[in-house]
Structure formats: structure tokens, C-alpha cells
Amino acid sequence: MRYEYPLFRPPSEANSLILQATLGCSWNNCTYCHMYRSKRFKVRPVEDCLEELAEVADRGAGRVRKLFVADGDALVMPMESWEPILREAADSFPNLKQVSCYAMASNVLGKTPEELRRLRELGLGVLYMGPESGDETVMRRLAKQPRPEGASRDEDYLFEAHVEASRKAHEAGMKVSAIFLLGAGGVERSQEHAEGSARLITAMDPDFLAALTLTIVEGTPLSATMDRLGWRLPDIYGLLGELRTMVGESSPSKALFRTNHASNYLPLGGSLPQDRQRIVETIDLALAGAIPLRPEELRGL
Ligand code: SF4
């Protein structure tokens, strides 16, 4: 594969073939995100993508079980790109079990129900969506997606956009993996962030749920705003408190929950709601100092 770095994928796609069908992110404006600031968004030529898939297939088609289509919001790609890529992947890799990509809510809402169903039929099965918070104020600070046409600056739309996008994806038969960001509300909006996130988890009803921890990256708009306004991130115990609220107060019908991202202090896993009590008790033990946390120097972005 010919990659243009940097290249990112979710932790659960560690063993997947990554096809970089787009470069960068079509939005590239979330205030905390540094991932693709060096890249100009581009949809790569389909022929190049098909050629790369064919090259991998020649070297061992049977080994590919999962395909992750990069970069940052690959769902935005037009159907004229998606359809041949998904067809080629299905034809080339006999053991292919899952195709996934990152998606903003606006990407999902920008596709018709028929287009989403077609993508699902062709193999796209999992969308990784990152509302990061369920508190409208925090989501607005993070600039989680473009404002819909006609919406005013202060209008609430981000929570509902994510609920609607998740509903549309589910109706098309896709699975939704939702990602939330501990610390995204800073100290002063920590409680609203955690409670709003729990509400959004319930409303999106994701199949997979992940919590990461916000790292402020110098050079991002959020870093500048925090310096200017004196906002601070919650300490470790504040972050664990947020996690406790998100797990304890949300009611997804059946979500596989993970905090195994390198940014987190406490790696946890289980199925919600079944394992809620056990997970909350583990967080309480960590809050009481009875469980060791990941040392700062071993954390990553
Ligand atoms: S949608 Fe994702 S990749 Fe794009 S700017 Fe936001 S966080 Fe970064």
C-alpha cells in the first residue's frame, strides 16, 4: 500500500488492512484535532485504490479479514468511489468479514437511506463516529461538524445530528462505534459533559462504545482558547468521575465498551448494560487508589 502519512486508525483496527481512499479530513476543523492539519483533503483516484487492493490480493488474499478505509471522514467519499472499492474488496478477499471507516454525523446525514443501504450491501458494516461529548456547549466548543445551512450560531443541533446519524446508520444495517472524550468540557463543564454524554450514548444506542482522554495539542485552536480563557483539564480523579457518570447513567441496549486507547489512565472493558455494575465498581476502586493507573509516561495520544 502507498500511504501518505500521518495515518490513523481506531485501536480495534490494529489488524486490519488500511486503504487510504481519502487523504485528510473534509472538515479538518474540530478545535482539539491535530490529526490532519498538515494535509489538504482529497479523494484519491479510484484506479489507484483498486490497484493497491489488487496488489495486496496478489500477495495473500486470504489473510485479509478486516478492511479500514481511511482517512478522517472517509464516508464523505462519493458513491462513485465507494462502490468500486467495496466491490473490489469483496471480490479480492474471500475471508473479508468487516469493512469500516470514520464518519462524521454530517457525512451520514449527507447520504440518502438508499445510498447507506447500498454501502451496507456492498460490505461497509461499521462506522466510527466521534461526538466526543453529548453536551451541546462542549460539542460547539469542539466544533464537531459544520453548522447546517440556515442554522444560527447558538442553535442546538449537534446532539440531535448524532442521534439522527446513528438512527440512519442502524436503519441501513450498519453498526455504530461511538467515541467520547474524557475531559472535553474542562473543569468547569465536566459534570454537564459527562451527563450529556451519558444521554447521547443512550440516544445513539451504539454497538461499540469507547472513551478516550483529551490531550491538548499545542497549535490547535482549543489549546489557544484554553490558554486565553484559563480553562483547565480535570485531574485524573475528575476524568475517572466523568467515566463513572458516562457508564453509570447511560443505557445502551447492547454495547461493547472499551477504554483501551493509549490516552486513558484506566483500561476497562465489558458489555453494557450487563457489566455496568462491575465497571462502576472498578472505577470506584481506582478512585479510592486501590487499582494502579497507567503511568503518565506510558500514555499516548
Ligand atoms: S472530524 Fe475527525 S479528523 Fe476531522 S477534524 Fe474532526 S476530529 Fe479531526
Image (cartoon, rainbow, N blue to C red):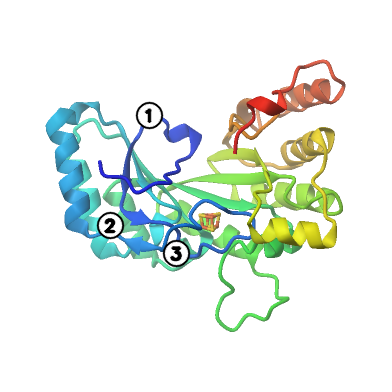
Left or right of 169, for residue 234: right
**Distance between the alpha carbons at the discs numbered 1 and 2:** 22 Å
Label 3's element?
A: loop
**Residues at marks 1 and 3 touching, judged by CB atoms closer than 8 Å:** no
Give how far across and how far down residue 242 sits, in percent: 78, 40
Residue 74 figure quarter? bottom left
Q: Name the N-terminal-most of marks 3 and 2.
A: 3
| SS category of the residue bearing label 2 | helix
Q: Provide residue 202's location: percent of width, then percent of height.
A: 66, 48
Mark 1, residue position: 15
Q: Can residue 267 be seen in this view?
A: no
Residue 199 x/y as whole percent: 72, 51
User: What quarter of the picture does the N terminus occupy?
Assistant: top left
- Give the Cα separation between the discs numbered 3 and 2: 16 Å
Seen from the viewer's position, the closer of residues 255 and 266 is: 266
User: Mark number for residue 82?
Assistant: 2
Residue 226 lies in quadrant: bottom right
Instruction: Tell me: is circle 2 under 8 Å from ligand 1.
Output: no
Visible in this render: residue 53? yes
State the quadrant of the C terminus.
top right
Q: Name the residue under label 3.
A: 26
Q: In this view, does 266 lie above or below 224?
A: above
